[in-house]
Image (spheres, coloured by chain):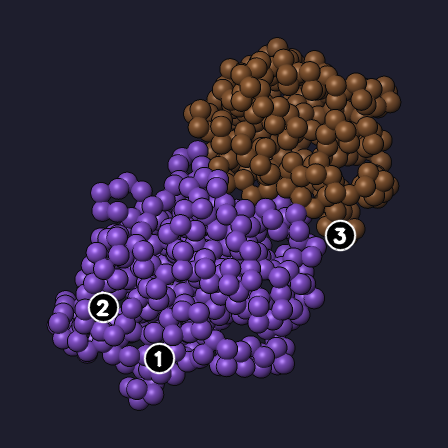
Chain colours: A purple, B brown
Amino acid sequence: MKLKKKVPLIDQHDKYGFWGGKFGGSFIPETLKKPIEDLTIKFEKLRKDKKFLKKRDFYFQNYVGSPTSLVELKNLSNHLGGAQIWAKVVSEANGGAHKIYNATVHALICKSMGKKYIVGDTGAGYAGKMLSMAAKKFGLKCKIFMGAKDIQRQKPNCDAIRKNGAEIVPVYSGSQTLVDAVSECMRYWVSNCDSTHMCVGSTVGPNIFVKICGWSTAQISRELKNQLIKKFKKMPKKIKLINCVGGGSSAYGFWSEFIDYSKKQIELIGVEAGGPKNSKLHAAPLSRNAKIGILHGAASYVCQNNEGQINETESISAGLDYPGVSPIHCFLKDTRRARYTFATDEEALNAYKLVTKFEKLNPSLEPSHAFAEAIKIAPKLSKDTICIVNSCGDAKKDRDILKKRLGKY
Amino acid sequence: MRDSLIHQTFKITKSENRPALITYTVAGDNTKKKSLEILNSISKYADICELGFPHNTPIADGGQIQTSAYRAIKNGIKIKDIFSIAAEFKKIKKNKPIILMGYYNMIYQYNENRFIKECQKSKIDGLIVVDLPFPENKTFAKKCKKKNINFIQLISPTTSSSRIKQIIRNSHDMIYYISMLSTTGGKLKVSPKKILKEYSKIKKQNSSKNVVIGFGITEKTIKSLNKADGLVVGSVICKAITDSINKRQNTVTNVTNIVKRLKNRIK
Ligand SMILES: Cc1ncc(COP(=O)(O)O)c(C=O)c1O
């Protein structure tokens, strides 16, 4: 299994949609074959269409608010000693997280396919919030599928979704979290694929959804590359790009321009949700060595039992609370280009406390997992090492959880 | 494979000028023992029995079948139990075809070859894998055929005509036509006339293939589709199990009565 240079990772799959011969694919019911084929043809056309690219860039700049800033966290770095810690504050993007890139692109695709309805899944509520925003902006009718447990724990985002005029469909099956929301959303699409476009909220699902999402969030790394060269005159010699991984859309978006660099120069570190310290449950299929399985139409490392039933997961972070992961991250793991680890609920909370104590930054629980890793490794690293964390979400949505766990928000 | 039990069954139903009645129940719903009892009892009226292997993330099933699947898993059903239910059934009803239906991850985890071997041992006649469409299923379908197990291809209203051609060419003795854009258990939202029109497009390409129709078939709708080679009823049966449990009634009797009535409507 080998990575190709100069070819975007999203395009390094075979004719059946597999990365590295075994991750990804399209394990879908027959009914979805045609809609997925139509979407694939449309997307491949649009991404080569100069007019469409211009439109995308226009909305990224004027609607999403590109570029988001790259800031040095001097106080935190001084406190920890060792490496310099930087943050790319992707939470500055319209709506407060990276999910806006994928949502905007899907809304544009939906429009150009002539469909009037769009549906999507959400865990933390950001993917749902952004899709409802984009739907409103482009005049589409929108339904968001969300687990009942997540509706309770991410209330601020639910309020936003409803305010944008979208309907939230609560999902009561299974663990009532993201995994169930994605299943229910796919079921809805099976029944309504003639009139409705589906957006998958991360780089998961059948091959084409991985590609569209990765293509959209890759904007983050294009910005970062420019910013680094501008700030440092040339690409620094020791960089670590640290990102939380749920489905993996934020991490892929953060890394995509840097995959061709050597691991020695630019290390890619993905941080999954380790769950509560004393719990057996987690949402870390890559770093805790889950087996390959098929979930939501793709083969990837999946938390499951040996009968192929998908395991329940547990994480304080609704956005990371998912048993599967993107096939492209499985590929990056097996080719050893990226390294994956996890942070527990407690480590993420401590990281949140430390970051907010020293910096004017308010990362949500998802990027707090990435900060936990940065905090762990920075003291051991040299002064000329640059650790950049993707601060991809704003903590407003976690208000209730943070109040409960830390006594204040 | 021309003389597979499935093919023979269709020969008989065709000679009787009626569609084959195909039932779907979930293995282990609500217990291993009960689901075998149900299977034995309904097979008096059903021509072919589909046995679902329950999965906890079923992306193409509606509420009724999900409920049955979750219930079976909660009651501890394992893959080995599913094979033993099938094997026990085939011991008693040698000539009744049984088809296993489920999602690919179960087969993938079990290992394709080992799965097929177990199917042979339990005398499984056919397999339906919901999320392994053509052409991804070509290799697996070939392996099944080699061991005299029918791999049943699916066709849906969204399937293009060139694709239908290829699928038919790669099919074995039975093809499953999905009546409408829906998960299982949806209300029939397309007129029977329209469904039969699509259906006849498939038959026209190769009339020797046995094509069955499923999704949205109830006591009310079954008669309107009786021109098909076979008709599959699933959610109605799963719902009857749920209702019987809730009312503390005898599931075997209730389900059998429904299957009997379904059969009477198409005789
Ligand atoms: C702020 C934030 N970060 C990360 C994630 C995890 O998703 P992904 O790994 O696709 O970026 C989510 C998902 O909801 C999120 O809202």
Q: Secondary structure at mark 2?
A: helix
Q: Residue under label 1, please give it.
A: A69
* Residue type highlighted by circle 2: Thr
Q: Secondary structure at mark 1?
A: loop
* Image coords of residue A25 (percent x, y): 54, 53
Q: Residue under label 3, please give it.
A: B160
- Name the image quarter holding residue B103: top right
Subunit bearing disc 1:
A
Q: Residue under label 2, please give it.
A: A356
Q: Secondary structure at mark 3?
A: loop
Q: Is residue A269 left or right of residue A188?
A: left
Q: Residues within 10 Å of mark 2 (few under 14, many from 20)?
A: some
Name the one closer to the observer, A264 or B223. Answer: B223
Give the spatial CA distance, label 2 vs label 3: 56 Å
Name the one closer to the observer, B11 or B39. Answer: B39
Give the spatial CA distance, label 1 vs label 2: 17 Å
- Name the image quarter holding residue B88: top right
Name the one closer to the observer, A289 or A363. Answer: A363
* Image coords of residue B100 (percent x, y): 60, 29
* Residue type highlighted by circle 3: Ser
Q: Is mark 1 within 8 Å of ligand 1?
A: no
Closer to viewer: mark 1 or mark 3: 1
Q: Is residue A169 left or right of residue A40?
A: left
**Residue at horizontal 53 percent and vertical 65 percent from the top:** A164
Q: Is mark 2 within 8 Å of ligand 1?
A: no
**Residue at horizontal 60 percent and vertical 48 percent from the top:** A188
Subunit bearing disc 2:
A
Is A331 placed above or below A183 here?
below
Precedes in sequence: disc 1 or disc 2: 1
